[in-house]
Image (cartoon, coloured by chain):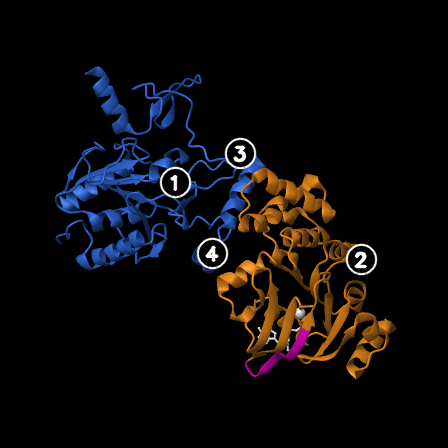
Chain colours: A orange, B blue
């Protein structure tokens, strides 16, 4: 099977400082990869390099495009990459306000990606927006309200709806449950798990919360100091960690 | 006592503006930056339009200046006087007689010809500004032709008002490429932008941008399939000349709610009136 995403020896430095280095992995269709590690271990740097928000110093990010099969995203032109970013890819930010237009209604937020790829029927756009609000458990009566009037959990669900409306094949998520209350986190996780399953999404989820990867991720990469120190099936890694750092990570969570 | 150069601006500045104009004509709808000069009038009085007019004006030209369709408003009168004084050009109120027309908020009703130039005064040249205040981002959107956001604005309009409520500065797509703000003309005038034999030049003084439509450029008003663009106007005829298809201003005639609809284009109205009376 062709990997949906194939990452080869990726490296990103900030001056003399290493953001991430020597990262290689394959992601197969329908798979969810979790990336865990302590603060500063390079998770966000890696995700931004994969999603085209940062330019890595070296390496390849090969995506299996619909039209032309596997292509190195880093060698694409900017318009091509941005087109990918609003069609086959989605990016869920930790802070909903970074991923939403706060001065645009919920319906307009969800509809934007549709309009960006050429949808020109107001009724159809609105119907799809309403459908997606329903799927992320936002009352359809809120469709014309701005996200500023939404709770943090609702904003995050709206951001997810806005991203998934164009049926992307690959979703990048950076701490999707970070900054939310525990009960709100649980609901969002349930929702995400349902969506990933129902839509057959492939995803890369960055988090420092092992509970999130336990629920969402099939496979796990553990990062430390910009490097991947352990990788494997989620249950395997969490139940039988091999690397001393992973052992520490898992045990420190269990102690809490 | 110093003498003014012809049409006030020095030749160096005019050459710089003409270069911007040529570039703007070569890339229809694209906003070309230019170094706007201080003019002896406040911003908001059409300093962008005045600089463009000054740069295209020749001694043989006949200038017409309109503000909201009228030749006799303060703004129109003072700009006309400005060029009478600094360029000694002939002026007129007749659309058909003018070679250069500077306008604020209207396109004349009388169809323009190939020997005419229409200069628009523009307050805000960037059509995407409303939803994306970052200039770096709007520039990239234009460069990459990412105009989904423009439809988000129209979507918000319909969601809030049940119809596209944008009545002025209604966004257009130029020659299938750049999205452009046609300046605050009523959307009734939008169809006149397209396939026009005259040269159309747009000047934004405070924002330092120039853009243009060469003759016979295709200009399309953005819309949705189920909410098509409509060049609407008040459903009345002009109380003076009886025209049923010119853009009308509503005039309150007394304090008992009496009102009247008159052509906003005063020259159009008067010439119809004269012809009718003759
Ligand atoms: N813009 C930047 N300039 C310089 N150094 C940076 C920059 N962004 C990140 N770094 C450094 O790169 C390393 C990796 O940072 P990164 O943000 O990827 O970590 P992270 O794993 O996402 O951390 P967190 O869990 O806190 O979000 C850190 O040492 C960080 O200080
Ligand atoms: Mg991070």
Q: CA distance from mark 2 to mark 3?
A: 40 Å
Q: Is mark 2 within 8 Å of ligand 1?
A: no
Upstream in sequence: badge 1 or badge 3: 3
Asked if one can make out residue A176 in the rendered structure from this viewpoint, the answer is yes
Q: CA distance from mark 3 to mark 4?
A: 26 Å
Give a yes or no on whether discs 3 and 4 share a subunit: yes
**Image quarter for residue A119?**
top right
The span shown in magenta is A15-25
**In the rendering, at what x and y percent does residue A37 appear?**
73, 74
- SS of the residue at dot 3? loop
Is the residue marked by circle 4 packed among few (<14), some (14-19), or many (20+) residues within 10 Å? some
Q: CA distance from mark 4 to mark 2?
A: 38 Å
Image point 49% across, 54% down: which residue? B146
Q: Which mark is residue B141?
A: 4
Q: Which residue is mark 2?
A: A186
**In the rendering, at what x and y percent does residue B264 appear?**
33, 29
Image point 13% across, 45% down: which residue? B59
Q: Which residue is mark 3?
A: B163
Q: CA distance from mark 2 to mark 1?
A: 50 Å
Is the residue marked by circle 3 packed among few (<14), some (14-19), or many (20+) residues within 10 Å? some
Give a yes or no on whether discs 2 and 1 share a subunit: no
Q: Which residue is mark 1?
A: B184
Nearer mark to the viewer, of 4 and 2: 4
């Amino acid at each position: 099977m062709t990997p949906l995403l194939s990452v080869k020896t990726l490296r990103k430095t900030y001056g003399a400082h290493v953001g991430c280095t020597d990262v290689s992995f394959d992601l197969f269709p329908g798979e969810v990869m979790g990336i865990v590690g302590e603060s500063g271990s390079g998770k966000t740097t890696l995700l931004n390099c994969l999603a085209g928000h940062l330019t890595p110093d070296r390496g390849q990010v090969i995506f299996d495009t619909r039209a032309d099969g596997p292509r190195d995203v880093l060698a694409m032109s900017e318009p091509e990459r941005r087109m990918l970013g609003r069609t086959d890819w989605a990016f869920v930010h930790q802070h909903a306000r970074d991923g939403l237009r706060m001065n645009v209604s919920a319906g307009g937020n969800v509809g934007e990606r549709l309009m960006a790829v050429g949808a020109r029927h107001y009724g159809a756009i609105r119907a799809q927006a309403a459908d997606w609000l329903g799927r992320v458990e936002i009352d359809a009566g809120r469709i014309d309200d701005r996200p500023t009037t939404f709770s943090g959990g609702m904003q995050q669900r709206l951001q997810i709806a806005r991203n998934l409306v164009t049926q992307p094949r690959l979703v990048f998520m950076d701490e999707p449950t970070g900054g939310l209350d525990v009960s709100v986190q649980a609901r969002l996780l349930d929702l995400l798990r349902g969506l990933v399953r129902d839509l057959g999404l492939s995803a890369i989820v960055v988090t420092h919360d092992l509970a999130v990867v336990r629920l969402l991720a099939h496979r796990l990469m553990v990062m430390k100091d910009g490097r991947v120190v352990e990788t494997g099936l989620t249950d395997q890694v969490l139940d039988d960690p091999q690397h001393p750092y992973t052992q520490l990570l898992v045990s420190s969570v269990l102690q809490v | 006592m110093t003498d003014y150069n012809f049409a006030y601006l020095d030749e160096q500045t005019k050459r710089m503006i003409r270069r911007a104009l040529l570039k703007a004509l070569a890339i229809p709808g694209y906003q070309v930056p230019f170094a706007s000069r201080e003019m002896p009038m406040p911003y908001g009085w059409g300093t962008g339009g005045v600089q463009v007019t000054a740069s295209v004006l020749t001694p043989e030209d006949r200038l017409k200046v309109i503000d909201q369709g009228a030749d006799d408003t303060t703004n129109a009168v003072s700009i006309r006087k400005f060029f009478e004084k600094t360029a000694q050009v002939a002026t007129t109120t007749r659309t058909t007689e003018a070679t250069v027309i500077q306008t604020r908020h209207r396109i004349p009703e009388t169809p323009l010809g190939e020997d005419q130039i229409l200069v628009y005064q523009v307050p805000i040249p960037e059509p995407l500004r409303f939803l994306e205040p970052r200039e770096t981002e709007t520039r990239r959107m234009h460069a990459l032709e990412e105009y989904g956001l423009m439809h988000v604005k129209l979507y918000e309009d319909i969601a809030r008002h049940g119809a596209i409520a944008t009545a002025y500065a209604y966004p257009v797509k130029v020659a299938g490429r750049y999205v452009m703000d046609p300046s605050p003309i009523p959307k009734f005038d939008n169809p006149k932008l397209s396939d026009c034999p005259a040269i159309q030049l747009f000047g934004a003084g405070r924002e330092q941008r120039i853009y243009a439509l060469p003759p016979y450029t295709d200009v399309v008003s953005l819309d949705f399939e189920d909410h098509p663009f409509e060049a609407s106007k008040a459903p009345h005829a002009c109380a003076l000349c009886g025209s049923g298809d010119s853009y009308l201003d509503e005039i309150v005639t007394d304090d008992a709610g009496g009102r009247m609809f008159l052509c906003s284009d005063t020259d159009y109205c008067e010439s119809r009136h004269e012809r009718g009376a003759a």
